[in-house]
Amino acid sequence: MSKPRISYIDPATVKDPAMIAEFERCAREGTPRPESQAIRAHVPAAFWSFANTWRDVFKNGVAAHNIKELCRIYVSRSVLCEFCGNQRSIKAAKSGLMEDDYADLINFESSTRYDERQKAALAYAEAITWDLPTDDAFWARLHKHFSEPELVEIGYFVAITMGQQRWLRTLNIEHHQILAGTDGSMAPGFETAEALERSKQAADYWAKINAKPSTQAAE
């Protein structure tokens, strides 16, 4: 079992009923899973800042949840955050997003899996993630598909999840280490510690292929 670079707060030692309930929700519903929150719990303000932002901006909000979920996994596969990339949104799955919909995210522009609106959002996520130049045509494309409130929310969400994922990948955290025994939000093939280990050893495991930044913004 990997050892985190910052220790987990054991939920059994937490006294705040609201924080206990949030840990239980993480174990049940995931995104986020309890391990990342067990790191943030060292600073309750950080714990609640992330929990509230995730609820209000990712799970709820003005932009389509499925769009934000695709952007989230695009970031995971770009920055190689395995902890985040091996989670799936239960809400997105219930609304029709399928596992195959995650397959071509790095090559979204050339893929036939995504419609023009999804591709525009992913181009936005790409530009933020890789610090790409953007021009009038880029922004015209975004404004064609999204309102300004939607663009604010998607951009803010991508920035939040990108920063968090870049941080989490340095921490050496792994699933099934805190409140183990639940599989809420885990991607297919990662539902248990044993399944996770087998999936990571597979030749076609997504994180074995390094993502490469583009040289210019998508058009």
Image (cartoon, grey):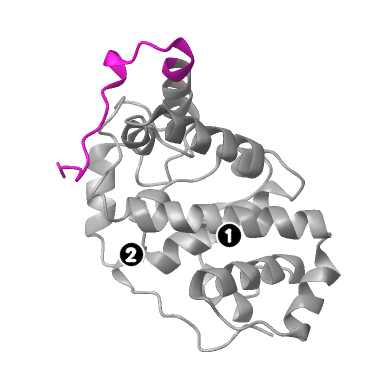
Does residue 167 appear in this view? yes
Name the residue at 50% across, 38% down. Answer: 50
Q: Secondary structure at mark 1?
A: helix
Whether residue 14 is in magenta: the answer is: yes
Most common secondary structure along the magenta stretch: loop
Residue located beneath label 1 in the image = 71
User: Does residue 122 sit above or below 164 in this rendering?
Assistant: below
Q: Quadrant of residue 212?
A: bottom left
Q: Nearer the viewer, residue 18 or 67?
A: 18
219 sits left or right of 47 in the view? right
Point out the tag, 2 or 1, that comes first from the N-terminus.
1
- How many residues crowd around disc 1 within 10 Å: few (fewer than 14), some, or many (20 or more)? many
Magenta part of the chain: 1-20
Name the residue at 45% across, 31% down. Answer: 45
Q: Mark 2 touching mark 1, by CB under 8 A?
A: no
Kind of residue sitting beneath label 2: Ala
Whether residue 208 is in magenta: the answer is: no
Name the residue at 21% across, 35% down. Answer: 7
The quadrant of the picture occupied by the C terminus is bottom right
Cα separation, mark 2 vs mark 1, equals 17 Å
Q: Position of residue 207 (x, y in %)?
A: 33, 64
The quadrant of the picture occupied by the N terminus is top left
